[in-house]
Image: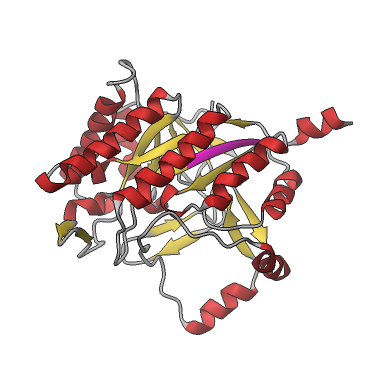
Amino acid sequence: MRRMELEKKPKIILTFDYEIYFGKESGTIEKCMIEPTEVLLNKLNFYNIKGIFFIDILFYIKMLSYSELTEKAKLMKEQIKKMVESGHRVELHLHPHWLDAEYKNKKWIFKSYKRYRFNSLDKIVREKVFQMGINELEKICREIKGDYKIEGFRAGGWCIQPFEDFYEYFKKYQIKYDSSVTYGISGKSEGHYFDFSNTPSKEKYKFSKMIEKEEAEGEFIEFTISTYKKNLLEKIYNKIMTPKFSKFGDGVGMNLKVDKKIDVIKNKLRTSICMYSIEGNFYHDYLIKKLRQEKKGSILFISHPKGMTECGINFIDKLVEENFKIETMY
């Protein structure tokens, strides 16, 4: 009976977006990236668990343009190399708004998010950004593994639509898969736009020029970010039971959407679609229960080291104790 129970559990895939904050306070690279990721890597390596890290490489490139940030860029580079050396996957994550960012008085200033989405760039800049990102990230990884090849992609802010704008670069740079789609969610702001209300509700599917359309002979694979539903009673229960740990990061995120006060109240009362994540604070037993109820063969988590706490680090212990199998995409 115990054996059958183990076989029914979904495989867990842990993915991480490696970046700082993009709001009024970007935070520091030490607190948002280096320190939390070091804690995370130590935990993953202890159990020989392999994660997937989507690297905000344009941030690294931007730091190199400021002489006073050379040493901080080196910290990021060395940590990426450590990921590769430990057997984790490192993949491409693009936030084009770094093109317009400025570093003043020891902090990052984001004057505009007009170029937050890849499709907001003209064709020449798109080519430059994708090529620059691939080349620089592979260059770092190949200092550890000479034949390292970037195979995966996650769009900044999940802004992968319309995919036609990415298609030729996926082909040219031999990107095999994307992991931006999160079934059932949508969002819009000055910089953001994504609408996954009509994407396939599968853990993975093949597609070509339209990421919303599954194709049996598609050229690429979409590994979707997994979600679960949380109703009002579950929200209240979790509020009571959730431990309170301070987050590692010292910045503030950008606003995805400015809601009216009445909409904020409605959102709190209605059932929410939540991404599986080990970010922030949450009640371990509740999330384990949700995982046990899953019918899918795999559940893909998305987390950001900047937003993690000791709660998420400890949850990795919980997954191991509960005998969940933690693997990468392949």
Residue 218: give x, y in percent of width and height: 48, 31
Question: Between 148 and 128, which is closer to the camera in this rendering?
Answer: 148
Residue 67: give x, y in percent of width and height: 10, 45
* Extreme residue in the right direction: 1
Camera sees residue 18:
no
**Dominant secondary structure, magenta:** strand
Name the quarter where the C terminus is drawn. Answer: top right
Camera sees residue 102:
yes
Name the quarter where the N terminus is drawn. Answer: top right
Q: How many marks?
A: 0
Q: Is 232 located above or below residue 218 in the figure?
A: below
Q: Is 23 located above or below residue 278 in the figure?
A: below
Q: Is 191 located above or below residue 260 in the figure?
A: above
* Extreme residue in the left direction: 67
* Quadrant hosting residue 202: top right
Q: Which residues are magenta?
A: 10-15
Question: Between 125 and 36, which is closer to the camera in this rendering?
Answer: 36
Q: Is residue 172 left or right of residue 106?
A: right
Question: Between 248 and 282, which is closer to the camera in this rendering?
Answer: 248
What residue sits 71% from the left and 48% below the top?
A: 288
| 85 inside magenta stretch | no
Q: How is the image coloured?
A: secondary structure
Q: Is residue 222 left or right of residue 239?
A: left
Residue 93: give x, y in percent of width and height: 35, 42
Question: Between 15 and 94, which is closer to the camera in this rendering?
Answer: 15
* Quadrant hosting residue 294: top right
What residue sits 20% from the left and 65% below the top?
A: 111
* Extreme residue in the top direction: 146
Residue 317: give x, y in percent of width and height: 63, 40
